[in-house]
Image (cartoon, rainbow, N blue to C red):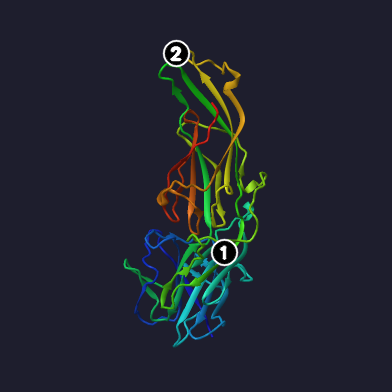
Amino acid sequence: MKRFFILAAIAATLTISCTKSDMVQVANESQIGFQVANYAAATKAVSAFPTNDTFGAYAWTAGTTGQYFINNNEVKYDDVNDVWTTETPYYWPKNQSVDFFCYYPFNTNGGVPEVSQNQITYNNIDFGARANQVDFMYADKAVGFTDNANLIDDGVSARGGVPTLFRHAGAKVKVNVILGTNEKIETVTNTKTKWEVTLSEVILSGIYTKGSCTLDLSSTDNGVIQWTKPTDSEGYHVWTPVTTVTNDVDNTLFKDVRLHNLVMGEGQLVIPEFYALPQALAAGQQKISLKVTIKAYRTQEGDATYPDYPADPYLVQNDKVFSADLLIDSGNANTSVFAWEMNQAITYNITLGPAGQQITFDPAIEAWDPKTYSTTIDISLGL
């Protein structure tokens, strides 16, 4: 029997609605059509799946158990015909509905994730190797589709094809460092002090890098059905770690040793974006350490200009190390960070403020699942 399916790229600005979409009846078509998208939440804009990449597909016909209609086939973009397709074409079966599941990245043995009709599982996945960092994604399951129900109405427009809507299985983290202020004036003596701050090392430690995750089908209805994320005892969508934490200070995945001459008000990316195992954060475990050299220049009372170099050698602090938890408990649920959850892109904006004797954190959850958090962690610089 001839088999075929087409995957049409979706527009980057299209907004997806709820977990299940209504099916629109259209004229019979024998070809199976897909649409490929990558989205984080129902209210957010969709990103088009990159045409230079591929993904894997499974499908089952109604009433079968363990028997695949499509069994881990690689899907590629055909730029000549402007379609996504497999090497072997697929057609809709007669008088049967079909369920679909797709995942990224494609692997020939089908082992990651492990797939069944009502469950997908990631076993012992290692997020630790920078050279092999992967954005693991899984698509919502498209359930009960036939050749006369291959348009999906999302409340905005009707789109041809079975929707292939990807979600991120991991988290994503990056770290920026900002010099907040570099000068202060003593109001009584009118003495001024300024700082030059050089950052020589940033280390993330105590981080789980390997774990497992199981997602179950959230509904038996037809349509586009989300998978239920794992939930820990505190209600966070995190994986189960299967190894001990990474505390090695020489772990290059979470270490930046470049010199950064910090400029007031300008952020510098010190830990580039990396995919992280979703994990609950614990006090005293996941930490960030900063090694800085601080030169302080201080005028005498009434002087208008600073000396060319610190007159007092005690004003120079070489390779001073500060450490703080990545867990942020501000006492307010809206301004606290207790976990790196699935589908979250987390940015730590760390402000160094020698004049205020503190490091301030202003983490934000970026494009994948937007939230905003603010808090301050006081760390004495000993000035």
In front: 20, or 193? 193
Mark 2 vs mark 1: which is more N-terminal? 1
Residue pictured at 49% horizontal, 86% vertical: 63
Residue pictured at 58% horizontal, 17% vertical: 312
Residue carrying label 2:
304
**Residue 248 to residue 303: above or below:** below
**Residue 86 to residue 28: above or below:** above
Q: Give the image quarter of residue 56.
A: bottom right
Residue pictured at 37% horizontal, 60% vertical: 43
**Residue 143 to residue 359: above or below:** below
Residue 38, image x, y percentages: 46, 62
Q: Quadrant of the N terminus?
A: bottom right
Q: Give the image quarter of residue 10.
A: bottom left
**Residue 226 to residue 64: above or below:** above
Describe the element under mark 2 as helix, strand or loop: loop
Dot in front, 2 or 1: 2
Q: How far apart are the alpha carbons under marks 2 and 1?
A: 62 Å
Q: Is residue 89 visible?
A: no
Q: Quadrant of the C terminus?
A: top right
Looking at the picture, which amino acid does disc 1 mark? Pro
Describe the element under mark 1 as helix, strand or loop: loop
Residue 148, image x, y percentages: 38, 81
